[in-house]
Structures are given as structure tokens and as C-alpha cells.
């Protein structure tokens, strides 16, 4: 989860409920003061205004589309990928990348906005296969793909230069989106991902390109769970156009309660990562699920006043790491450690919701889980638990071990980087 070297955000603002009704009411008042129209004409005008109000407030409505960067040809795309340590052998085309902002809903179902990327390959194809890529953990909003060209955008370039229209959501509270980031919150990751697909379809049509129905869904680390959440929604026909075509999650912490938390407590995860992810988990889940009464209940006095602020989305990964201790006993009170060992109802419910992406459905599309034996952050037991749950539901899921590579790829190649060329080849074969 590279996020502690870049970063995400979270600042809560909710759009007022009933905005659509208010917009229609304004239209009605305006119509009443306008010059008289014939009855049929007036009804048509009011219907048109109401339709515009509905469209402007609909989930996935495109708000802005800004050019981010372009790569003229396959060689340029390959150079971009190579510069960031990615395999460039599949880079055949130039790429145009846009930053989109769009309507979506927050973790409570209230209207909000989000941002993300759309990359279109420079090909003659008018109808494009679609890849949805979900990124790993970030703590600083400025590290999200749509505002941070570099390592964060390389996966998008990789898929697009291979010929796929590619979308990459920033998630809520990241990039240009308002509000604090609800980390590891599958429902909001799902809605942000689905609504970006809708906005991308609208924009692509204006460029004379059509996004095909079938979506190839992938994601890394936090994005692995997000990918499964999006796949579940697509299979359930959450959208009238898009359908699930394949799933390729990489190095996910799917089974946080049964695999990741025990590994954190047992010292199986490097101490600095155990501290960082535990702090993020408690702060983020308390914001969305109210898992503790006060920070001092779970964080020791030295960190009780600063832990929540560190994860406000405005601190860089380096700042977050520097603001935390070197071990869990230094970070947490006895009550905090006990909460992790035996989660209360609120935390248990949140963790169960996270694991539900493996447990409560049966993907009908091809699915392969990618993992790495050298992963120092997301332990392999997560993938094993997810695979077992899927197979128990009758799913013929595969698993691909990437070998002794680590999670984030610094200083060595990470599972994220190693998996992408394999996933591209797999997607190509599925075609």
C-alpha cells in the first residue's frame, strides 16, 4: 500500500438532501413569472427543466473534463512506464489522459463529487474495451492518480497504451473530491468507481468513442477489495449499460478480521506498517462506524490528540510515518489492543462488510487473484481466505503467485508492478 509515501484525503461535506426538488421548484417559480406560454408549451418547458435538473444531479453526471497529459505514441508511453519501473512491452499506442470530476454519493448516500482519470488509447478503434483500475492506499489527497502524474498514473498508461480505455477513480475525499477519505469502505469505493465509469462513457461519446459494455476490473491493495466491490455491483446490474467481464485483484487485505489483524498483532507485518495501518484503520472506521468513544480510549496519551489529525488528508505519507511510533504497544492503550484482538460490534460489522466482497456473492466472470510470497504488508492468508470463500460459493477462481516480491516495490519490484503485464496478457487472451 504505497500510500504512506504519497497520500489521500477526507473532509466531510454533504450535499443537502432535496437539492433536486429545490431545483425543480426554482424552475416552476421561474416559469410562473415568464411570459405566458400555451399550456402544452409550458408543460414541455417545465419537463425539460426538470430533466436537466435530474441529469445534473444524477450519479455519474460529468461535471468537468480537463486534459491531464498526452503521450504521442507507443514509444512515448513505453518511456513513461520504464521511467517508473513498469514493464513496457505491451505499450503499443499513444495515450490521452483526462481528469474527470463527476457526481456521486458519499458513504452515507448523500450527494457529493469525486475525481478520477480517463485514459484513451490513440487508436482507430471507435468501440473500446474498458479497464477499471483501483489504486492502493493513499493518505494524502495530492497523491491520488488524477493529481499526481508519475507512479500513480503508470498503471493507467500501461492499460491504455495496450489498447484499453482505462478509468481510475481517486475514491471519495481524494484528489479533487471533498470530505475525509473513508479508507477501506467498500460501498463508497464501489459507488465512486461505478459513477466514474458513467462519467467516462459520457465524455468518451463526445470524443466519438464508445465504451463497450464489458468491464475488465482490477485493483491493487486497497484497490483489490474495491475491484471486487465494483465487480459485484456490475454483475448485479447496478448500471444499465456496463457489465462485468473479468476480475483481477492484486495483493488485497480482504480478510482483515481473520487474517490481517492477527498478523499485525503477531508481528508478522513489519512494525512500521503494522502501526501505520492500525492507526489508519481505527481512525477511518471510527469516522464511518463509531468504533470508539474518544481517541484517548484506544491511543496512548502521546498520540491521542494527533492520530486523527495525521489522517486528515493533508499530511503526506512521510509526515504520517514520522508522527507515529515504532510499535503497536507504543501507539495503543490496553483497550486499543483489546479492541483489535476482540473487535466490538461496530468494528466487527465494518470488517465483515470488507470481507463480504469474497463471501456473499459468486462471480460468473473469469477471476484470478494475484499475490506475492514476499509481501510484507498484505499477508498471503488474505488471498487464501478470499479464494476459499469464492470456491465455497462454487466459483472457479484461480490464484497467481508472483514469487518473492514485496508489496509496494521499493527498493525492489512490487507485486503491483509485477502483476500488471501479466494481467494485460490475461485480458488480451480473454478477448
Image: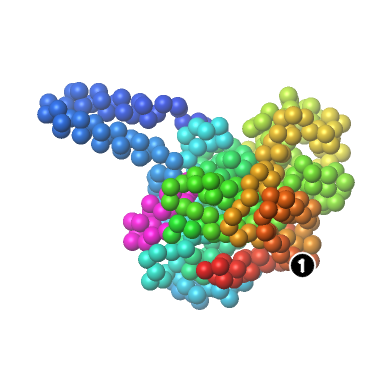
Residue 301's spot in the image, x, y percent?
A: 81, 30
Snapshot quadrant of residue 308: top right
Residue 74's spot in the image, x, y percent?
A: 49, 74
Residue 29's spot in the image, x, y percent?
A: 25, 23
Q: What residue do we see at 64% from left, 32% from top?
A: 288
Looking at this view, name the residue that lies furthest to the front. Answer: 394
| Residue 351 left/right relative to 124 | right
Q: In the picture shown, does residue 284 fall above or below 216?
A: above
* Pick the front one: 344 or 359: 359
Q: In the picture shown, does residue 227 fall above or below 335?
A: below
Q: What residue do we see at 74% from left, 65% from top?
A: 401
Residue 99 seen anywhere in this rendered image of the structure: no
* Pick the front one: 181 or 126: 126
Q: In the picture shown, does residue 318 fall above or below 423?
A: above
* Pick the front one: 72 or 37: 37
Q: Is residue 194 shown in magenta?
A: yes
* Chief secondary structure of the magenta portion: helix
Question: Does dot 1 land on a helix, a strand or a loop?
Answer: loop
Question: Is disc 1 surrounded by few (<14), some (14 to 19) or many (20+) residues within 10 Å?
Answer: few
* Pick the front one: 80 or 388: 388
Q: Which residues are magenta?
A: 193-211
Q: Which residue is mark 1?
A: 403
Residue 303's spot in the image, x, y percent?
A: 77, 34
Q: What residue do we see at 53% from left, 36% from top?
A: 106
Residue 187 seen anywhere in this rendered image of the structure: yes
Q: Is residue 143 shown in magenta?
A: no
| Residue 120 left/right relative to 140 | left
Q: How many marks?
A: 1
Amino acid at each position: 500500500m504505497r500510500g504512506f509515501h504519497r497520500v489521500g484525503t477526507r473532509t466531510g461535506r454533504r450535499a443537502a438532501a432535496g437539492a433536486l426538488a429545490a431545483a425543480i421548484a426554482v424552475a416552476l417559480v421561474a416559469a410562473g413569472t415568464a411570459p405566458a406560454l400555451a399550456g402544452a408549451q409550458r408543460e414541455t418547458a417545465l419537463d425539460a427543466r426538470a430533466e436537466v435538473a435530474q441529469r445534473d444531479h444524477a450519479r455519474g453526471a460529468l461535471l468537468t473534463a480537463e486534459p491531464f497529459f498526452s503521450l504521442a505514441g507507443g514509444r512515448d508511453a513505453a518511456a513513461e512506464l520504464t521511467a517508473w519501473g513498469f514493464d513496457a512491452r505491451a505499450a503499443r499506442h499513444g495515450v490521452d489522459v483526462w481528469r474527470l470530476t463527476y457526481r456521486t454519493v458519499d458513504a452515507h448516500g448523500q450527494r457529493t463529487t469525486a475525481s478520477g482519470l480517463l485514459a484513451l488509447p490513440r487508436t482507430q478503434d471507435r468501440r473500446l474495451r474498458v479497464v477499471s483500475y483501483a489504486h492502493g492506499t493513499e493518505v494524502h489527497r495530492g497523491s491520488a492518480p488524477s493529481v499526481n502524474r508519475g507512479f500513480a498514473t503508470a498503471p493507467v498508461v500501461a492499460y491504455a497504451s495496450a489498447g484499453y480505455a482505462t478509468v481510475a477513480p481517486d475514491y471519495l475525499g481524494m484528489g479533487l473530491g471533498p470530505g475525509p477519505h473513508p479508507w477501506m469502505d467498500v460501498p463508497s469505493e464501489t459507488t465512486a468507481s461505478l459513477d466514474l465509469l458513467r462519467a467516462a462513457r459520457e465524455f468518451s461519446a463526445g470524443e466519438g468513442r464508445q465504451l463497450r459494455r464489458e468491464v475488465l476490473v482490477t485493483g491493487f491493495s486497497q484497490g483489490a477489495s474495491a475491484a471486487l466491490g465494483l465487480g459485484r455491483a456490475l454483475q448485479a446490474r447496478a448500471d444499465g449499460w456496463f457489465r462485468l467481464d473479468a476480475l483481477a485483484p492484486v495483493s488485497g487485505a480482504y480478510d482483515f478480521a481473520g487474517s490481517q489483524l492477527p498478523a499485525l498483532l503477531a508481528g508478522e507485518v513489519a512494525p512500521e506498517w503494522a502501526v501505520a495501518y492500525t492507526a489508519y484503520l481505527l481512525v477511518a472506521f471510527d469516522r464511518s462506524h463509531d468504533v470508539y468513544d474518544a481517541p484517548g480510549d484506544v491511543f496512548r496519551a502521546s498520540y491521542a490528540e494527533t492520530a486523527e489529525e495525521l489522517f486528515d488528508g493533508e499530511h503526506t505519507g512521510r509526515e504520517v510515518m514520522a508522527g507515529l511510533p515504532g510499535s503497536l504497544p507504543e501507539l495503543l492503550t490496553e483497550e486499543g489492543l483489546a479492541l483489535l484482538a476482540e473487535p466490538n460490534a461496530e468494528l466487527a460489522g465494518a470488517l465483515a462488510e470488507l470481507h463480504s466482497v469474497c463471501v456473499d456473492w459468486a462471480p460468473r466472470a473469469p477471476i484470478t487473484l494475484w499475490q506475492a510470497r514476499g509481501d510484507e504488508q498484505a499477508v498471503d492468508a488474505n488471498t487464501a481466505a478470499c479464494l476459499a470463500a469464492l470456491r465455497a460459493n462454487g466459483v472457479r477462481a484461480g490464484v497467481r503467485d508472483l514469487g518473492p516480491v514485496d508489496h509496494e516495490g521499493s527498493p525492489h519490484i512490487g507485486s503491483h508492478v509485477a502483476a500488471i503485464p501479466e494481467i494485460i496478457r490475461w485480458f488480451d487472451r480473454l478477448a
